Image (cartoon, grey):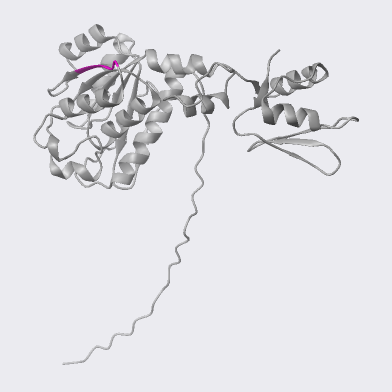
């Protein structure tokens, strides 16, 4: 007999009238019974096989999305355990989503502030196969926003430093590197054809228009891609397989704050995980906004006649 547990994101409480309230961030389900709901609450809290009369109620709650079947064989403390619990909030087959991530291959173009942070998130998610593309070496000025590298990497090609970082964190990682400028040419097309990536992440914006040019090659070859970029006041993460609008000007800048790269990279990684798992994981961040008040000050200026 199946055991059931609350789906992640749900909680339960018992009211004075004996009704059991199941609540998540957006919904509430109230369960009432003439004989009380304590046995149902106990079955969910203890993750124990429920009495037969409760099966119909639990199956209905499963259809409504409030509870899920409990898998006693699943590792609750493994590398992906917390992520599997997160997937449980949206699906009844979290292992399938994790398998999709672990089976895909990513091509990351650009390992600067955005690309390196994106790579960090995808490694944490469990993606094990990569092609890393960048022409630069690690410099001290990178350290305010590029957390893959340390002082022992100074002067070392970023692709090699990033490869070491990936292999340190993933057993049996498959990681290839390409240390040269990327251009929308036959060599790039060959790179795509040989590696057959599940998704290409574009985090380069020089020369101007290179992201659009690379996107055109991938559109022609049917390779999915994701484009992101960071400016001073604006960041962008495009929908999968959407090239930047040529009518929108792109201003490249050396100036950077690590938090802006991190926010854009995290948003891009979230979209990449949605694309690779073929799932939607809606998530909003509530930010308290400070209201700026403009104050007009009158200044009197005395002008002396000469």
The residue drawn where x is 89% and y is 30% is: 35
User: 214 or 170, which lies in front?
Assistant: 170
To which quarter of the image does residue 248 belong? top left
Q: At 57% across and 20% down in the image, what residue appears?
A: 91
Q: Is residue 302 left or right of residue 87?
A: left
* 51 in relation to 14, above or below: above
Q: Residue furthest top?
A: 194
Give the side of residue 8 with respect to residue 270, left or right. right
Residue 144 versus residue 20 in the image, above or below: below
The quadrant in which the N terminus is found is top right
Residue 231 position in % (x across, y down): 29, 43
Position of residue 68 measured from the top left corner of the image (x, y, whole percent): 64, 22
Give the extent of the magenta segment: 172-176
Residue 288 or residue 250, whichever sits in front: 288
Q: Residue 285: x percent and y percent?
A: 49, 43
- The count of marks equals 0
Q: Whole-percent x and y of residue 302? A: 27, 88
Judge from the rendering whether residue 54 lies leftward or rightward of residue 100; answer left or right. Answer: right
Query: Does the magenta portion include 173?
Result: yes
Q: Quadrant of residue 92?
A: top right
Q: Is residue 224 magenta?
A: no
Q: Which secondary structure type mostly characterizes the magenta part of the structure?
A: strand
């Amino acid at each position: 007999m199946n055991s059931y547990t609350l789906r992640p994101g749900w909680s339960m409480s018992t009211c004075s009238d004996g009704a059991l309230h199941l609540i998540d961030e957006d919904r509430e389900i109230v369960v009432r019974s003439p004989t009380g709901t304590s046995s149902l609450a106990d079955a969910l809290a203890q993750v124990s096989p429920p009495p037969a009369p409760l099966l119909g109620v639990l199956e209905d709650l499963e259809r409504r999305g409030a509870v899920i079947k409990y898998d006693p064989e699943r590792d609750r403390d493994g590398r992906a355990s917390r992520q599997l619990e997160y997937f449980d909030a949206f699906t009844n087959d979290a292992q399938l989503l994790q398998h999709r991530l672990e089976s895909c291959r990513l091509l990351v173009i650009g390992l600067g502030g955005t690309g390196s942070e994106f790579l960090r998130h995808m490694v944490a998610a469990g993606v094990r196969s990569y092609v890393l593309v960048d022409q630069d070496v690690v410099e001290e000025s990178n350290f305010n926003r590029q957390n893959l590298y340390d002082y022992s990497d100074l002067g070392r090609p970023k692709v090699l430093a990033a490869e070491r970082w990936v292999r340190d964190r993933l057993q049996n990682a498959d990681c290839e590197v390409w240390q040269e400028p990327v251009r929308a040419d036959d060599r790039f097309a060959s790179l795509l054809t040989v590696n057959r990536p599940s998704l290409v992440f574009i985090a380069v914006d020089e020369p101007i228009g290179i992201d659009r040019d690379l996107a055109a090659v991938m559109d022609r070859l049917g390779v999915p891609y994701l484009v992101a970029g960071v400016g001073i006041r604006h960041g962008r993460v495009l929908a999968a397989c959407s090239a930047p609008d040529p009518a929108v000007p792109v201003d490249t800048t050396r100036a950077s704050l690590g938090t802006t790269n991190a926010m854009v990279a995290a948003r891009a990684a979230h979209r990449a995980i949605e694309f690779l798992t073929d799932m939607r994981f809606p998530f909003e961040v509530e930010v308290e906004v400070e209201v700026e008040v403009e104050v007009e000050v009158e200044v009197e200026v005395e002008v002396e006649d000469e």
